[in-house]
């Protein structure tokens, strides 16, 4: 049987516990997981692309070891389907927090299928504990001096504090 390769794309700015939860679920479905860290300057990132890749890669080491699934963290700045094809992905993993996420994701699936109907999209629901966590809200809380350690891994919380200490 061929190796199943999954792709979990996102900006991960910052990586949240919700993202980590989706990765922990995704590794149960694939033999290899590529986490595609998107450039997406339109969102006004807090972290540079290099910083985001490093933070995600650091957090994935424990999941890779525990699951036995190879996890690669790779930046990309191309069309998602072109990136998926380049990493030979069989499935694209998307995390859902709320019903409002589904409408946008549903539209994306339709467009992606028109580009390549050989790559399936799989939606994974975040654990109820993480459904309210959004990277945009984490950044807002941190910017206003709030504590974010309940929403992000410890190393990410420290990096966020470091960013706002410089401001």
Image: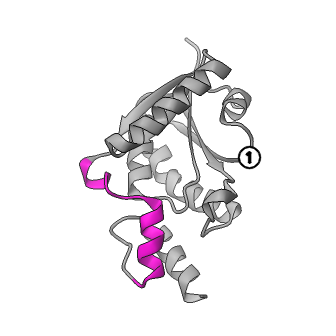
Q: Residues within 10 Å of mark 1 (few under 14, many from 20)?
A: few
Viewer-closest of 68 and 75: 75
Q: Position of residue 73 (x, y in %)?
A: 63, 47
Q: Quadrant of residue 26?
A: top left
Question: Residue 130 magenta-drawn?
Answer: yes
Q: How did the renderer colour the structure?
A: one colour
Quadrant containing the N terminus in the rendered view: top right
Residue drawn 74% across the image and 46% down it: 77
Q: Position of residue 161 (x, y in %)?
A: 50, 81
Tell me the residue that label 1 is attached to: 77
Q: Position of residue 139 (x, y in %)?
A: 48, 70
Question: Secondary structure under badge 1?
Answer: loop
Camera sees residue 153 = no
Where 109 falls versus 161 (above or below)?
above
Asked if residue 49 lies left or right of residue 145, the reply is: right
Camera sees residue 50 = yes
Q: Position of residue 8 (x, y in %)?
A: 54, 39
Viewer-closest of 97 and 29: 97
Residue drawn 49% across the image and 76% down it: 158
Residue drawn 40% across the image and 36% down it: 102
Where 157 falls versus 153 (above or below)?
below
Asked if residue 62 lies left or right of residue 116, the reply is: left
Where 15 falls versus 31 (above or below)?
below
Residue drawn 51% across the image and 36% down it: 69
Viewer-closest of 67 and 112: 112
What residue range appears in magenta? 128-145
Asked if residue 28 lies left or right of residue 45, the reply is: left
Tell me which secondary structure the magenta stretch mostly adopts: helix
Q: Quadrant of residue 51?
A: bottom right
Report the residue that reaches farthest toward the top.
Answer: 1
């Amino acid at each position: 049987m061929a190796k199943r390769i999954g792709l979990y794309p996102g900006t991960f700015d910052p990586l949240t516990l919700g993202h980590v939860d989706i990765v922990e679920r995704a590794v149960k479905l694939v033999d290899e997981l590529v986490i595609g860290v998107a450039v997406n300057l339109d969102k006004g990132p807090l972290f540079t692309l290099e910083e985001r890749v490093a933070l995600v890669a650091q957090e994935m080491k424990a999941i890779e070891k525990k699951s036995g699934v190879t996890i690669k963290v790779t930046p990309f700045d191309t069309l998602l389907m072109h990136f998926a094809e380049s990493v030979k992905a069989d499935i694209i993993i998307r995390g859902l927090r709320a019903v409002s996420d589904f409408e946008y994701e549903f539209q994306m699936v339709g467009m992606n299928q028109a580009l390549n109907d050989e790559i399936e999209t799989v939606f994974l629901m975040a654990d109820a504990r993480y459904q309210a966590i959004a990277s945009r809200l984490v950044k807002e809380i941190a910017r206003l001096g709030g504590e974010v350690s309940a929403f992000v891994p410890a190393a990410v919380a420290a990096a966020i504090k470091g960013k706002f200490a410089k401001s």
